[in-house]
Structures are given as structure tokens and as C-alpha cells.
Amino acid sequence: MRPMNPPQEWQDEVLAGPGGAMTDEVGVITGPLTLRTLAAPDGKIRFEVQYTDADEWYTLSGSPLPHGDPHALHRAALAAIRVGNGAQAPAAPA
């Protein structure tokens, strides 16, 4: 049996562009945000956002993704949030 890889995580602060980022729990959030991307041992990639320095984390709509390069997807999610327009999780490559 092959051992599962430990989770990998990336976290960055980002200023959301006009229209912010879309979350599953509370809809659009705007302003200074923190994005956390977690690559779970099962291969799924989860994106969470919060108001910077807040306690609550929200699921970025479209998350989790079934697979992909988690670091590249983290950078793509940061870019999407900077643009705004209700940014969602980037699409996983086919």
C-alpha cells in the first residue's frame, strides 16, 4: 500500500478587486482578504478565504477541485481575487 502524502498549504493576503470573491457560506466578500489553499492527501484542492485577521474562513465557490497543481492553482486564485467580479476557484486542468 502506498502511503498518502501529507497535506500542503499556501496562504497569502490579497486585496479583492471590485465585486470581490464569491463564497459558499456568505456570498461575496470584499476588501483585504487572506486566501488559503490546501492540497489534501486525497488529491483534492480546497480554497478558503477570510477577511484578513478574522477568525472565520469561508469556502471559495467552486472549491474543492478534484486535482491539479496546487501551487499554480493558488496563484491563479490570487489573480482571480485581485480582479474581483465574484471570483471563484480556478478550473482544474483537464
Image: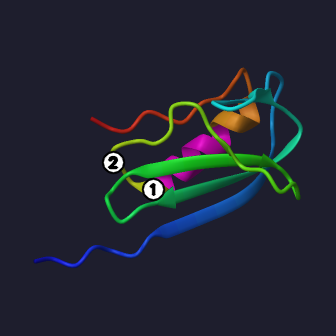
Q: Which residue is mark 2?
A: 67
Asked if residue 73 is among those painted magenta in the image, a careful observer would answer yes
> Residue 24 versus residue 29: which sits nearer the camera?
24
Q: Position of residue 43 (x, y in %)?
A: 33, 57
* Label 1: few (<14), some (14–19) or many (≥20) C-alpha neighbours in 10 Å: many
* Label 2: few (<14), some (14–19) or many (≥20) C-alpha neighbours in 10 Å: some
Q: Position of residue 12 (x, y in %)?
A: 72, 59
Q: Which residue is mark 1?
A: 70
Q: Position of residue 18 (x, y in %)?
A: 83, 24
The numbered disc on residue 7 is none
Three-letter amino acid code at the position of disc 1: Pro
Point out the stretch of residues depicted in magenta: 71-79
**Considering the numbered disc 2 on the image, is that residue within a helix, a strand or a loop?**
loop
Q: Position of residue 73 (x, y in %)?
A: 49, 48
Asked if residue 54 is among those painted magenta in the image, a careful observer would answer no
Residue 56 shown left or right of residue 37 in the figure: right
